[in-house]
Image (cartoon, rainbow, N blue to C red):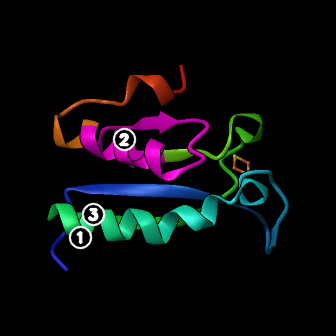
Amino acid sequence: MLKPDHHILVCASFRGTEPKGKCIKKDSLQLIPYIEEEVLERGLNVMVSSTGCLKLCEDGPVVVVYPEAYWYKGVTNEEAVDEILDSLENGGPAEKYLLT
Ligand code: FES
């Protein structure tokens, strides 16, 4: 893989070795295969990774896009992922899900 243009981080709730936060309970990990599929389909040079708890549990599932540093909240479904990827392709954030 080339060095990615963007890195999408999906909170997997780990604190230490245990998934103790809330995002995983809201099925955050179910989003990863869909994001990877969409990234491929759209021909984007994006890496997708799971992370430990990002300390914003009440707003989860939390997804972060770097290097833009877009922090998203409430990414609960494929529609939200689509909006985030559409916005990324258009060069901006998906305002509706941005953490402020
Ligand atoms: S579990 Fe995702 S922010 Fe804490």
Residue of label 2: 84
Q: Which numbered disc, 1 or 2, marks the residue that appears first in the sequence? A: 1
Residue at horizontal 56 percent and vertical 43 percent from the top: 75
Report the span colored magenta.
Answer: 64-86
**Above-or-below relation of 81 to 39:** above
Would residue 50 appear left or right of 83 to someone viewing this image?
A: right
Q: Residue at x 36, y 41 (%)?
A: 84
Around disc 3, counting alpha carbons within 10 Å, would you say few (fewer than 14), some (14 to 19), or many (20 or more)? some
Counting every numbered tag in the picture gives 3
Query: In 3D space, how far apart are the residues under numbered discs 3 and 2 (Cα atoms)?
Result: 11 Å
Are circles 3 and 2 on residues that touch, CB within 8 Å?
A: no
- Extreme-top residue of the structure: 100
What residue does disc 1 label? Answer: 40
Identify the residue at image location x=52%, y=47%. Answer: 63
Q: Is residue 85 a member of the stretch shown in magenta?
A: yes
Closer to the camera, 40 or 10?
A: 40
Give residue 39's mark.
3
Residue 10 painted magenta:
no
| Residue type at tag 2 | Ile
- The quadrant the N terminus occupies is bottom left
Q: What secondary structure is found at the residue carrying circle 1?
A: helix
Residue at image coords 45%, 45% = 79
